[in-house]
Image: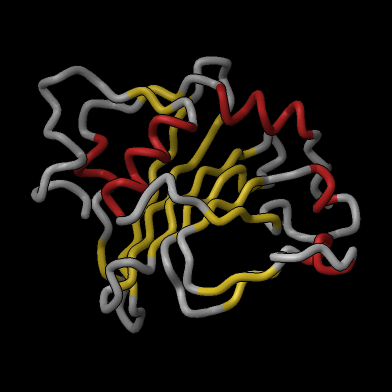
Amino acid sequence: MPRTLTDDEITSFVAESKPLRKNWTTRLRPRTKSNYQHAQRDLEVQGEAGNCFRIIIRQNAINRLDFSLILTFKDTDGSEFVLRRYNGKHPSQHTNRLEKARGEPNSSFRNRFHIHKGTQRYQEPGLPIDGYAEVTTEYASFDTALQAFVQSNGIVLPGDDEPSLFDPKGVA
């Protein structure tokens, strides 16, 4: 059974500098999987402190606002932990289960841009590490979500000679 990450560890992993290699836009451009309604691609990244991370990009082929940008931490034993997940508008409802159990208002929402955040408190009762999510106005499209994702998760882009991720020929 994987260990429980503390909130301090999660904060440290998210903040750790994660430099991308020069060919990152090509290696991260989503590809459609057969028999799936989404395109997906992932990229392993070595953090400056030596930790291993994976960036996963997924986008629905029909609904361009239904996407996920995911940052995971890969532990030395092979366990993988979702630290952050920037989601677009998907039709299923999200419920913050601990908040709902306490009767807190607005613990559920549907079809809104939102960010899942890995937490210690969700792991402790055996819930998914990224079971907690917050509605966001930080982004309103795949491209702006990708910009927010890069800026907020310690991702360091290579020099200016790399094609921009955010132009029409990029990932989206």
Q: How is the image coloured?
A: secondary structure
* Of residues 47 and 122, the one drawn nearer to the viewer in this rendering: 122
Measuring from the top left, give residue 41's x and y in whole percent: 34, 55
Residue located at (26% from left, 49% from top): 143
Q: Is residue 130 left or right of residue 39?
A: right
Q: Is residue 116 left or right of residue 162?
A: right
Measuring from the top left, give residue 70's x and y in whole percent: 49, 49
Residue 93 picture quarter: bottom right
Residue located at (56% from left, 45% from top): 84
162 versus 39 height, above or below? above
Residue located at (50% from left, 23% from top): 47
Residue 19 picture quarter: top left
Measuring from the top left, give residue 131's x and y in whole percent: 70, 59
Measuring from the top left, give residue 161's x and y in whole percent: 10, 22
Q: Is residue 40 left or right of residue 3?
A: left
Residue located at (30% from left, 25% from top): 157
Label tally: 0
* Of residues 68 and 133, the one drawn nearer to the viewer in this rendering: 133
163 versus 115 height, above or below? above
Identity of the residue furthest to the bottom in this view = 35
Q: Is residue 136 left or right of residue 149?
A: right
Q: Quadrant of the C terminus?
A: bottom left
* Of residues 120 and 108, the one drawn nearer to the viewer in this rendering: 108
